[in-house]
Image (tube, rainbow, N blue to C red):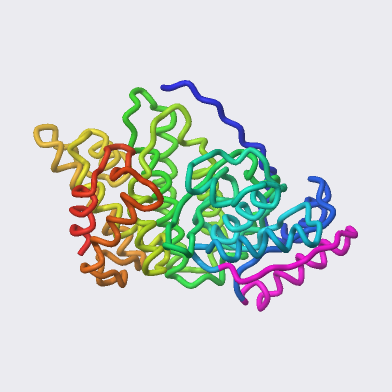
Amino acid sequence: MENFTFYSPTFFAFGKDTENQAGELVKRFGGTKVLIHYGGNSAKKSGLLDRVEASLKNVGLSYVMLGGVKPNPRSGLVYEGIELCKKEGVDFVLAVGGGSTIDSSKAIAAGVVYDGDFWDYYNTGKPIEEALPVGTILTIAAAGSEGSPDSVITKEEGMFKRGASGNAIRPKFSILNPALTQTLPPYQTAAGVTDIMAHLYERYLTNTKDVEVTDRLIEGLLLTMKHEGPRVIADPNNYEARANIMWAGMVAHNHICGVGRSQDWNSHCIEHELSALYDCAHGAGLAVTMPAVFKYVMNHDIMRFARVATRVWGCQMDFDHPEVTALEGINAFQNFLVSLGMPKNFEELGAKEEDIPKLVEVLCRGDGRDGTISGFVTLNEEDCTNIYRMMV
């Protein structure tokens, strides 16, 4: 295990009707004027925004609102939010929505107090060390941004999808009411389950030895998703299944499973170009991307893939041919995602084979990259081309 530091100060309010605590929590963490940042009409139609506004008013807090966050959140709305916050004297950002809304809120919070262009953080990997405080009210269990120091934004000029990180953008509090996710369409629910499992696999694929504690945490969470995913697709109103998925999504990405070990994230990088170009659901893109990446790199550490195959997917270990077990586990994972309603290839995702050169160029060369992406295995342009072709 490697040396590490871990800091996760987010206050969580979990359970039914917890959104009514929003005003009290904003005030507790120092907010006096709030930006309520949200996505589309669902938060309005459901009455959630009304409840949030009432909660703020009840404790005497003023606020402004900015909606319009889309999946794969865009830089244009971030710039608009930064200007609005500066103009209105906002000192707290409250995200009402899923990972896209939370990521956009984090980018706004960082940009308000930064003298330069907020995109500097996303383009260079420079850590975010100062930001307005952020709180969240989660409506989709998927990205884990409600507990993480991470944010992903798409720059509209060039359609670069990049991430930034820093403990300054960890939410001060997150309100997690599983009932708020019960109206999600099955496809969106399944995409969320996929995203959570991707966050676990990206940490599981490590070159660090002797990390049994975090290996077992990851395997346990994967088993939870394996159990709860089909239950929630069969019964969208299953509150307990939704509760387990929601908490697993947070634990999967607040970094407790990634301490002391190297991590991968190549599947995320490769998928980001798909969702940036085609505007597909991130989880759906990952469902197509991960099996291809895993099959391409599995020989780097056959036993790691064989281990998750036996411990999570119930495969029998073939000690003479561990590659058989490893491949069986990857196929079991892909079949599980397909059973939830996720796509399995380019065609089902809406991607086009003729776009592969463009995808590879932006992935490997865009925004100053050097032609490779690094994680569990370092991949060059030829590798990435081969992986995209495996998805066709």
Residue for point 21% across, 35% down:
300
Q: Nearer the viewer, residue 255 or 310?
A: 255
Look at the picture and state if 227 lies above or below 203: below
Q: Which residues are magenta?
A: 41-69
Residue 100 in which image quadrant: bottom right
- Quarter of the rendering occupied by the C terminus: bottom left
**Place of residue 355 in the rendered image (x, y in percent of width and height, measured from the top left):** 25, 66
Residue drawn at (27%, 37%) of the image: 377
The residue at the far left in this view is: 320
Tell me where residue 210 appears, x and y as whole percent.
36, 23
Question: Looking at the image, how many numbered discs can be counted on the residues?
Answer: 0
Q: Is residue 375 left or right of residue 296?
A: right
Q: Inspect the magenta stretch and tell me whether residue 109 lies in it.
A: no
Q: Nearer the viewer, residue 138 or 224?
A: 138
Looking at the image, residue 51 sits to the left or right of residue 302; the answer is right
Seen at 17% across and 38% down, the residue is 299
| Image-quadrant location for residue 176 | bottom right
Q: Can you say which quadrant of the picture contains the N terminus? A: top left
Say which residue appears at 78% left-offset and 50% top-offset: 25
Q: Pinpoint residue 126: horizontal percent, then vertical percent.
A: 53, 39
Residue 220 versus residue 136: which sits nearer the camera? 136
Q: Position of residue 346 (x, y in %)?
A: 26, 67
In the current view of this chain or complex, which residue is farthest to the right?
Answer: 60
Residue 50: say if magenta: yes
